[in-house]
Image (tube, helix red, strand yellow):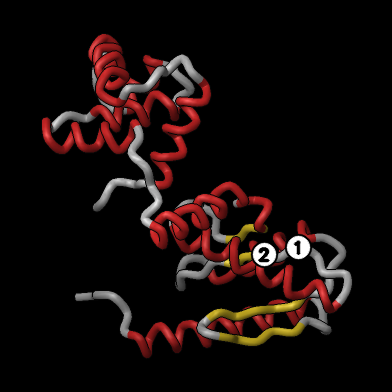
Amino acid sequence: MTGEPSAPDRVAAGHRIAEALALHLAAVHPRTAAASLGGVTYAVLPTSSDEHALRVAEAFLGRINNRVPAVIGIGRLAARPAELRRSHADADRALRVLGSGRSQRRAARLSDVYAASLLEELTDRIAAEDDLPDGPVIRLRAHDAQHNTALTDTLEAWLSTFGDVAAAADAVHIHPKTFRYRLKRLAVVAGIDLNDPEARFEAMLQLRLNPPHP
């Protein structure tokens, strides 16, 4: 019988990953520096490109495989010591996205996950200020909950397939004719003009900022 690892086990696993990463980076460049802070291991790797840093990170994750869960965020190049803080912040933002489930990647630069990082920051603001206004997605979810319908899933499938009704209907396992009916119905319920690109963008943003509760 297995279960979630205990806190001491997670700490021990973190130490093992930190040691393995330090050894891996030292083999890449002897002037690498690494240290753990607050459960996160930070490293400074002398390199001429963040692409090289990404390859080093991916090689390390390939070595440890899936034996232990680990993700690596990579900051931008720092030409001077004063730029290390900015690089550190980049790495933290990328790391947060990788740990949030918004990306399937295990290593990334901030530029690789920038849009998802902005969504994380917007989500924080909304949570702190209770600042999510009423909108089409909110109305659809309320309707689905009250009437046991799946109009929100219909909208998300349609947007995700760029308006391809056949592909969207296949994604939600219904006939295209039924899908078209639901599409017309959700436009009325949500009060959304699906021909308006701004309305579509707003709906996509709300779907990502306000995920369904588990």
Is 117 rendered above or below residue 68?
Answer: above
**N-term mark: 2 or 1:** 1
159 relative position to 107: left or right: left
* Residue located beneath label 2 in the image: 90
Is 30 rendered above or below residue 99?
Answer: below
Q: Measuring 50% from the left and 30% from the top, which residue is drawn there?
A: 201
Query: In 3D space, how far apart are the residues under numbered discs 2 and 1 (Cα atoms)?
Result: 7 Å
202 relative position to 111: left or right: left
Q: Are marks 2 and 1 in contact (CB under 8 Å)?
A: yes
Confirm whether residue 62 shows in the render: no
Q: In which quadrant is the N terminus drawn?
A: bottom left
Type of residue at label 1?
Arg
Type of residue at label 2?
Asp
Q: Which mark is residue 76?
A: 1
Secondary structure of residue under mark 1: loop
Q: Measuring 65% from the left and 67% from the top, which residue is drawn there?
A: 91
